[in-house]
Image: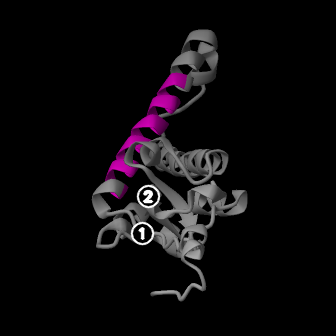
Amino acid sequence: MQTAYSTPTEDILTPEYTPTHADTNKRFVNYLVDFVVFYAIIFGVSFTLAIFSPDTLEGLDTESPGANLLDRLLSLVLYGLYMGTVESIFKGKSLGKMITKTRAVNYDGTPIDIKTAFLRGFSRAVPFCAFSAFGTPSNPWHDRWTNTLVADDASLDKTRF
């Protein structure tokens, strides 16, 4: 969309930024990196607990019938909490997004707020949410439900971040 400007310098002073959806491959890399980092943190915390407080881990009953389901649900919730925290602290970025030079933003290209970051994070706890990311452009449930998208950094107004 072309905008008519009254002076030639006005074009330089008021650029239009339209967020560009990150492609599916970048989104997949984001997911893999963030998933690995999350489980590395969980492993580190568990390892530290095992060293300094072995009695804490002995109380976990992994043999009961519902333990596996409970572990999976707890992992989903902790992953949502982790992603919400990271995206709120780093203004829509996670380690995966830093690597691929992408960022979670509102549809209009503005930064997400803390509430939106946590809504995005906890939306990921919905079973099979990861499968909703397949397609081009990648538009998973946690983006749709929070009116956000993951955009390439180059398409965003740098003065807002």
Q: Residue at x 60, y 85 (%)?
A: 6
Q: Which of the image's four quarters has the N terminus?
A: bottom left
Name the disc covering residue 154, or none.
Answer: 2
Of 128 and 94, which appears nearest the observer? Answer: 94
The reply, left or right, for residue 99 in relation to residue 9 is left
The answer to which of marks 2 and 1 sits earlier in the sequence is 1
The answer to which of 158 and 132 lies nearer the viewer is 158
Residue marked by disc 1: 20
Whether residue 154 is situated above or below residue 65 in the rendered picture: below
Q: Nearer the viewer, residue 36 or 45?
A: 36
Residue at image x 57%, y 54%?
A: 92
Label 2–label 1 contact, CB within 8 A:
yes
**Residue 49 screen position, x and y as percent:** 59, 19
User: Circle 2 — which element?
Assistant: helix
Give coordinates of residue 135: x percent, y percent. Answer: 29, 72
The location of residue 40, given as percent across then percent down, is 45, 30
Query: Which amino acid, mark 1?
Result: Thr
Q: Give, as a three-letter code, the residue at label 2.
A: Ala
Q: Is residue 9 visible?
A: yes
Question: Where is 158 relative to 19, above or below?
Answer: above
> Around disc 2, counting alpha carbons within 10 Å, would you say few (fewer than 14), some (14 to 19), or many (20 or more)?
few
Q: Quadrant of the C terminus?
A: bottom right
Element under disc 1: loop
Q: Is residue 161 above or below residue 129?
A: above
Q: Residue at x 57, y 17 (%)?
A: 48
Q: Which residues are magenta?
A: 27-44
